[in-house]
Image (cartoon, coloured by chain):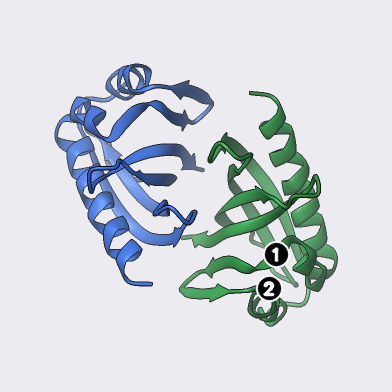
Chain colours: A green, B blue
């Protein structure tokens, strides 16, 4: 049960570091069959996903992960990742809680891509 | 994109109604390869999962779903379900926020079972 946990942890660190530094670079993690549900918006495909992420109405953001759970999602190396955390945008003083779930699938060359992605703020 | 949303909604209503009425009856939704991560506990198999759920330290619980998002999780009819909500246990006055993710897989007879289940309270 070790490997998928380690991969989930590496992925999550890389994902939020990239998001917080320059979120257009997340394009490398999605494919044309990837799905993103961001709050009430449902989007498919890397172009639409990156357009959504880069058009979010804040300039700077910092994610802080509180919990990270992972499970195998199929018999072909897929990994389900559930994150809870807090994020701080721009000049805001109060972090907002969020939850995000990913399904990672092997990309056939030793790495993974994001097949499912769903994000919600927690009020 | 309609069918998986409807199934996710039906499942979620059934799941929390059953949980709140008599949670041992959730056994029908799990299989021996099902996985549950409940807070920091990771459990596999229907027997262990039901033992965990029925031993939680409250007598009555009421779940209230705030958001429900669903996506297809594979090409064989799997469905990823992400829930955020609040729950109230026993005599508590203050609801606790939670998030829960399920992967539902077709059981081969027209219904679904829970393959992945991860639950976290949000503090």
Q: Quadrant of residue A44?
A: bottom right
| Residue drawn at x 45%, y 38% as measured from the top left | B116
**Label 2: few (<14), some or many (≥20) within 10 Å?**
many
Residue at the extreme right of the image, as rendered: A21
- Callouts 1 and 2 on one subunit: yes
Task: Pinpoint residue B19: horizontal percent, then vertical percent.
Answer: 23, 36
Q: Quadrant of residue B7?
A: bottom left
Residue under label 1, please give it: A30
Residue at the extreme left of the image, as rendered: B21
Task: Pinpoint residue B105: horizontal percent, then vertical percent.
Answer: 38, 45
Residue A83 as seen in the image, left or right of residue B87:
right
Residue A46's disc number: 2
**Is residue B29 among the parts visible in the rendering?**
yes
Residue A120 as seen in the image, left or right of residue B53:
right
Task: State which chain disc 2 sits on.
Answer: A
Q: Nearer the viewer, residue A107 or A93?
A: A107
């Amino acid at each position: 049960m070790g490997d998928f946990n380690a991969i989930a942890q590496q992925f999550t660190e890389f994902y939020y570091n990239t998001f917080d530094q320059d979120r257009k670079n997340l394009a490398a993690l999605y494919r044309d069959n990837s799905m993103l549900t961001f709050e009430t918006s449902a989007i498919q495909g890397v172009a639409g996903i990156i357009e959504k992420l880069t058009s979010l109405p804040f300039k700077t953001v910092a994610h802080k992960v509180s919990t990270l759970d992972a499970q195998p999602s199929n018999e072909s190396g897929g990994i389900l990742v559930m994150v809870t955390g807090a994020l701080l945008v721009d000049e805001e003083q109060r972090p907002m809680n969020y939850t995000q779930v990913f399904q990672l699938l092997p990309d056939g060359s030793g790495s993974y891509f994001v097949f499912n992605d769903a994000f919600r703020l927690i009020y």
